[in-house]
Image (spheres, rainbow, N blue to C red):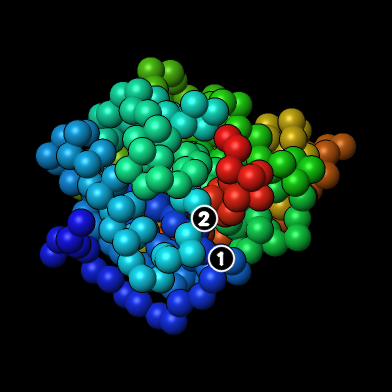
Amino acid sequence: MAIPDQLEPTISQPSTGTVLALDVGGTRLKGAVLDAAGRSLADLTQATGADAGPDEVVRRILHTLVALRDLPEARDVGAAGLALPGLVDPVDGRAVWSENIRWRDVPFQTLAEERLGLPVTVGHDVRACGLAEAQVGAARGQKNVLVVPIGTGIAATIITDGHVVDGRGLAGELGHLDVGYDEPCACGGTGCAEAVSSAAAIARRYSRRSGVNVEGAAEVLERKRDGDTVAVDVWAQAVDGLARAFAAATTLVAPDMIVIGGGLALAGPDLFDPVEHQLRDRLTFQRMPTLVPAALGDRAGCIGAGILARQRIEAGGRR
């Protein structure tokens, strides 16, 4: 299959023992051919095409996987990993539902294996990112970790005793813990951490309370630094919501480390310092986790998808 103009190949020297990896985002598909050490031999990016509907997104995903397989760097490829957003059932290899892409019950594992002629592992995008941070990123060497990307929403990868807790696609919904605020959430609940402490929520709540539309949480942070009282209060409530959610997670799964990623992590000490202080104050007998920023950035999902593929090879191709 010819590579269309939307695909932008970036090629380096090939190696052996390769896997295919594809991370599906809201706007971009990020694919790679990875060697046995996780190094990228070739990269392909393409627009997700969500505006054209879920069928088009599925078509582009399958096309990009085939395009990756057909690159010369993929001649020794043994498996593929696919990281998907929304609700994902990794056991059946299905994308159950995505609010942003609007697909429902898509059998990606079956479709991709039929197209590629390779074993394919399907996983959740957040858990793929968490797996990457735990194995080669900020939490390398840690066996009890919470990896929490904070952007439009809030989710978590829970790694306990070195094992990712999946719950058949439903584990780690940290953003839907009730943190005690009278704030409606898109999930239908009230008081969810995601409705108070996500980057999107910070911008939305500031705009609503101040009457001034802002582009994102970064602008709210700048206004907070300038002494804007509404920004100060909105930011403080976001910090409080995160501390409450982290305290609940720490009590339940006892992470040694919490890795914070996503756009909100770019706030640096304005986020990390008050969250750490409030979390410490909320804990009694629990072990205080170390809070660190994520290390892999937007590469984490693709790296994690590659790890899923590598695990499939190590399992002898079995699901």
Along the horizontal axis of the image, is 58 left or right of 135? left
Classed neighbour count for the residue bearing mark 1: other residues with Cα under 10 Å, few (<14), some (14–19), many (≥20):
some
Does residue 15 appear in this view?
yes
Q: Three-letter amino acid code at disc 2?
A: Gly
Seen from the viewer's position, the closer of residues 137 and 243 is 137
Residue closest to the far top: 188
How far across and how far down the image is residue 225, in percent? Answer: 42, 63
Residue closest to the far bottom: 13
How far across and how far down the image is residue 70, in percent? Answer: 32, 61
Seen from the viewer's position, the closer of residues 156 and 315 is 315
Do the numbered discs 1 and 2 sit on residues whose CB atoms are within 8 Å? yes
Residue at left offset 83%, top offset 39%: 286
Does residue 281 appear in this view?
no
Residue at left offset 36%, top offset 71%: 72
Q: Quadrant of residue 2?
A: bottom left
Q: Which residue is mark 1?
A: 17
The quarter of the rendered structure image containing the N terminus is: bottom left
Tell me how far mark 1 sits from mark 2, CA to CA: 7 Å
Seen from the viewer's position, the closer of residues 36 and 274 is 36
Q: What element does badge 1 sit on?
A: loop
Q: Which residue is mark 2?
A: 78
The quarter of the rendered structure image containing the C terminus is: top right
How far across and how far down the image is residue 308, in percent? Answer: 56, 48
Seen from the viewer's position, the closer of residues 46 and 275 is 46
The total number of labels drawn is 2
Q: Three-letter amino acid code at disc 1?
A: Gly
How far across and how far down the image is residue 93, in percent? Answer: 46, 31
Along the horizontal axis of the image, is 207 left or right of 201? left
* Residue 263 higher or lower than 187, as above or below: below
